[in-house]
């Protein structure tokens, strides 16, 4: 799979959001572990980004609502509002 470079973002804020994301829903643990490998200016696999985007758009499952909100915050921090 293609590897892509990340831009610049605040790592402390990012780590706090990933911790909250992991605690927000039982199914977020694996993705949170992959996100923890992201570093400003580092590399990431596009699948990680697409999995994160899936959490941003999940609708209808109120149990995942907190994960969706935090995933959107992570997306905005790392990629900006426009993707």
Image (tube, grey):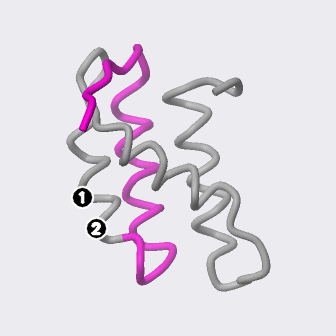
Instruction: Tally the numbered discs.
Output: 2
Tag 2: Cα neighbours inside 10 Å, few (<14), some, or many (≥20)?
few
Q: Which residue is drawn at 55% across and 30% down?
A: 77
**11 or 68, nearer to the observer:** 68
Quadrant position of the C terminus in the picture: top right
First to last magenta residue range: 1-28
**39 or 51, nearer to the observer:** 51
Q: What element carries label 2?
A: helix
Residue 78 drawn at (x, y percent): 49, 29
Circle 1 residue: 33
Q: Which residue is drawn at 31% across and 18% down?
A: 5
Q: Which mark is residue 57?
A: none
Q: Is residue 15 magenta?
A: yes
Circle 2 residue: 30
Q: Does the magenta stretch include residue 10?
A: yes
**10 or 26, nearer to the observer:** 26
**12 or 2, nearer to the observer:** 2
Q: Are marks 2 and 1 in contact (CB under 8 Å)?
A: yes
């Amino acid at each position: 799979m293609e590897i892509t470079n990340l831009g610049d973002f605040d790592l402390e804020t990012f780590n706090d959001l990933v911790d909250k994301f992991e605690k927000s829903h039982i199914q977020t643990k694996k993705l949170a572990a992959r996100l923890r490998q992201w570093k400003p200016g580092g590399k990431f696999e596009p699948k990680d980004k697409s999995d994160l985007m899936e959490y941003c758009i999940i609708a209808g499952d109120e149990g995942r609502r907190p994960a969706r909100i935090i995933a959107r915050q992570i997306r905005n921090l790392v990629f900006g509002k426009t993707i």
